[in-house]
Structures are given as structure tokens and as C-alpha cells.
């Protein structure tokens, strides 16, 4: 397991050092468009806290952070009108899943048949 690197790309996006196309920002979460979309709608949702992976998040985040994070995921999907047509939420964790950015994030994919 990696320790959290505060210079990972999403940490830099959170510090506004790198721009992003923001979809939603709350006290605990940020959602923005993926730079290399795999579907017509491809949004990443990240917690603002320093968590490497889903396991790290579940173990280390407060109930409030976890609750707010998943509510943000739902809010993004509704904002993009995805619940009616359907969508996919996924997270990659660690080596076998080819996690590229070591700041926990979920992908929201939709806008076509997946
Ligand atoms: P992972 O494989 O870690 O689940 O996916 C990381 C995702 O982050 C990829 O889909 C990749 O396109 C996206 N990504 C990487 N760098 C940037 C960036 O600088 N800006 C944005 N918006 N997305 C990024």
C-alpha cells in the first residue's frame, strides 16, 4: 500500500494548481470531468481528504466524510441527468486494477450504452 503523496495530480487539482472542468464542489468532495473520457459523460468524484484508495477511505475517513462523499456522487449523477438512462460508478484500487492516480476517486460513466 502506498502512503499518500500530496503532490499527486488530484491533490494539485484540489489546491487549484492544475485546472479542471468542475461539475460540483462541496465541503468534502470535488467532481470534475475526466481528461481522457471513456464515455460521453465521464466524471471523477474525489474526497477532499488525503486518501489513497477506497480501502484507505473506508478505514480512515469519518462517517461524515463518507456520507457526504456518496451524497456528492448521487448529486453529480442527478445533475447530469443520468439516473433515468443509467450509468456506471467504479473505482480502481491498487496494482491489479491499474490505479493511475493515488488519490481515491470514483468514475461516473454514462451517456451511451456501456
Ligand atoms: P484511475 O486509473 O486511477 O482509476 O484513473 C485515473 C483517471 O484520471 C484517468 O481516467 C485519467 O484520464 C484521469 N486523469 C489523469 N490526470 C488527469 C488530469 O490532470 N485531469 C483530469 N481531469 N483527469 C485526469
Image: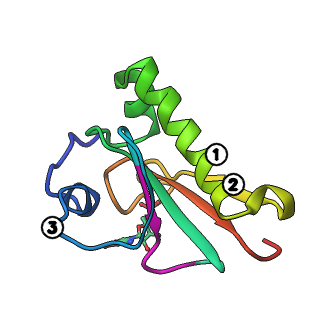
Are discs 1 and 3 less than 8 Å apart at CB?
no
Q: Is residue 113 above or below residue 109?
A: below
Q: Is 31 drawn above or below residue 17 in the view shown?
A: above
Residues packed near mark 1 inside 10 Å, few (<14), some (14 to 19) or many (20 plus): some
- Seen at 37% across and 38% down, the residue is 28
Residue corresponding to mark 3: 17
Q: Which of marks 2 and 3 is in front?
A: 2
Give me the residue at 17% from left, 49% from top.
5
Residue in the picture at 57% in, 37% down: 71
Where's residue 79, x and y in %? 64, 59
Judge whether residue 36 is colored magenta: yes
Residue 65: name its quadrant. Answer: top left
How far separated are the C-alphas under marks 2 and 3? Answer: 28 Å
Confirm whether the magenta stretch covers residue 34: yes
Q: Is mark 1 within 8 Å of ligand 1?
A: no
Tell me the distance, in whole angstroms, between the alpha carbons under discs 1 and 3.
27 Å
- The quadrant where ligand 1 appears is bottom left
In this rendering, position of residue 64 left or right of residue 101: right
Q: Nearer the viewer, residue 17 or 102?
A: 17
The image quadrant of residue 40 is: bottom right
Among the two numbered marks 1 and 3 on one chain, the one whose residue lies closer to the N terminus: 3
Q: Quadrant of the C terminus?
A: bottom right
The residue wearing badge 2 is 78
- Label 3 crowd bin: few (<14), some (14–19), many (20+), radius 10 Å: few
Q: Which mark is residue 74?
A: 1
Amino acid at each position: 500500500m502506498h502512503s499518500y503523496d500530496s503532490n499527486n495530480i488530484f491533490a494539485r487539482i484540489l489546491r487549484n494548481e492544475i485546472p479542471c472542468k468542475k461539475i460540483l464542489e462541496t465541503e468534502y468532495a470535488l467532481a470534475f470531468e475526466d481528461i481522457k473520457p471513456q464515455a460521453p459523460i465521464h466524471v471523477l468524484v474525489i474526497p477532499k481528504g488525503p486518501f489513497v484508495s477506497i480501502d484507505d477511505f473506508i478505514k480512515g475517513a469519518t462517517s461524515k466524510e463518507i456520507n457526504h462523499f456518496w451524497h456528492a456522487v448521487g448529486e453529480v449523477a442527478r445533475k447530469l441527468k443520468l439516473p433515468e438512462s443509467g450509468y456506471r460508478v467504479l473505482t480502481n484500487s491498487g496494482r491489479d486494477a491499474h490505479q493511475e492516480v493515488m488519490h481515491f476517486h470514483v468514475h461516473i460513466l454514462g451517456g451511451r450504452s456501456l
